[in-house]
Amino acid sequence: MGLGYTIFAKPFLAIQDSEKAHSRALKLLRLMVSNPITRGTVSLLYKPSKQVPITKFGLDFNNPFGIAAGMDKRAEALRGWEALGLGFMEIGGITMLEQLGNPKPRMFRAGKSKALVNRMGFNNPGSEKIALQLNKHFSKHGQPRIPLWINLGKSKLTELEDAPTDYATTMQRLWKYADAFVINVSSPNTPNLRELQNDEELKKIIDSCKAVNNTESESQGISLKPILVKISPDVDDNQLSAIVNTARSNGCSGIIASNTTTSRPSENSGKEQKVFAQTGGMSGLPIQTSTTEMISKIYKMTDGEFPIVGVGGIMSGEDAWQKICAGASLLQAYSGFVFEGAALTKQVVNGIEKKMRQNGYSTLDQAIGSAHRDD
Ligand SMILES: Cc1cc2nc3c(=O)[nH]c(=O)nc-3n(C[C@H](O)[C@H](O)[C@H](O)COP(=O)(O)O)c2cc1C
């Protein structure tokens, strides 16, 4: 949807069904990057002119800005994300089993508030089909040029107590293709999924994913892949601290803060009320401040020693900078692309580079968490 925004006229987009517009935009991006000339044009128009390199979890990123999970659920536009100059891409959520997700419509846009409400429900082709597709992609185009992360969700049909096997099976099927994995226990759209954030449940999922990581790493002679946990913004401070501790003490590499929220803005225009009345998770501008505060809290509770991926309402370079200063090492966006278009990457990356220069930082690492220090 967001990419289409820059390509189609705004009024045209405004009357399109949100999910259809999104799918058309992905198809268009895919088409454009399939030809070297149009691929070059996409890069020329949208690729940031600056690089803001950073190394985290042993992975090198040209810049810290990636697409958030949900944007490319079917891994359809991998070369498109590279061409747009993103620092990394997270595909999925992918579940062990193929599933249709919730009935449509299930994605809603509140333009004035720059917010989305979605209840997609992990619609995806399932881990087996995604493995085949990635295999095809890798054979044809080789390894992606930017780190590829895979978001793991739980199949709706799988009982909560069998969740560890569900996550681990997807991870095993996709292990060789990913540079990192994200355990998503925070989507509001799969019944009871968020219960898996509880200490014991989360530990079991992490353990089963770690077991796959160890086995695959040994058998393929490749180093272990980072595993991160993505959390909900709807947890209180005690729950937040418990989840972060569980992830950290059980060997995860970092935290993604955060997923969508079930809360709604306290004020909104009458027209948007219809969108906010929809069941589902809200993303975009209304969660910008709360997710930055969450990053700050995690940074403080871990003394800045546990990498945080900041996501929630990034619409500009300034918003991205706030999250870096609060303690995020890497950043992601979904809604920002919908409302600001494909030029968001350029705005964010060039914006961060400018802020670094203004503040006298020569590396991004110096800026991370700077709001907590008197530098
Ligand atoms: C339509 C849609 C689908 C999403 N699907 C997933 C998903 O499958 N897995 C996940 O972890 N997050 C998913 N998310 C959440 C985003 O990755 C992100 O955490 C959230 O939207 C906040 O970022 P934003 O304000 O930049 O959109 C989805 C978000 C949207 C809007």
Image: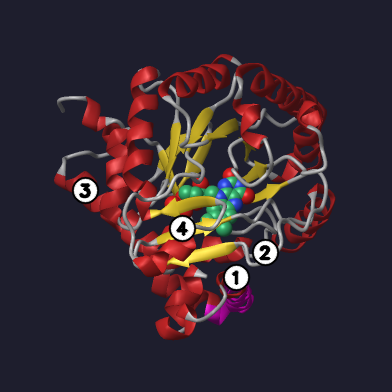
* N-terminal-most mark, 4 or 1: 1
Query: Residue 370, position in %: x, y?
Result: 24, 31
Foreground mark, 3 or 1? 1
Query: Residue 203, position in %: x, y?
Result: 66, 19
* N-terminal-most mark, 2 or 4: 2
Tell me what residue is drawn at x 46 percent, y 70 percent. Answer: 43
Task: Give the residue at mark 2.
Answer: 76
Q: Which mark is residue 355?
A: 3
Query: Residue 165, position in %: x, y?
Result: 81, 30
Labels 1 and 2 touching (C-beta < 8 A): yes
Labels 2 and 3 touching (C-beta < 8 A): no
Sort mark 1 into few (<14), some (14-19) or many (20+) by Cα contacts within 10 Å. many
Task: Give the residue at mark 4.
Answer: 276
Please check the rendered image and state whether residue 158 is part of the magenta-colored stretch, yes or no: no
Task: Give the residue at mark 1.
Answer: 26
Tell me what residue is drawn at x 38 percent, y 33 percent. Answer: 294
Query: In what quadrant of the picture does the C terminus appear?
Result: top left
Query: Residue 214, position in %: x, y?
Result: 75, 23
Foreground mark, 2 or 3? 2
Labels 2 and 4 touching (C-beta < 8 A): no
* N-terminal-most mark, 2 or 3: 2
Residues rendered magenta in the picture: 23-38
Asked if 317 appears above or below 164 in the picture, the reply is below
Circle 1 SS class? helix
Tell me what residue is drawn at x 54 percent, y 61 percent. Answer: 81
How far apart marks 1 and 2 lie (CA) works out to 7 Å
Sort mark 2 into few (<14), some (14-19) or many (20+) by Cα contacts within 10 Å. many
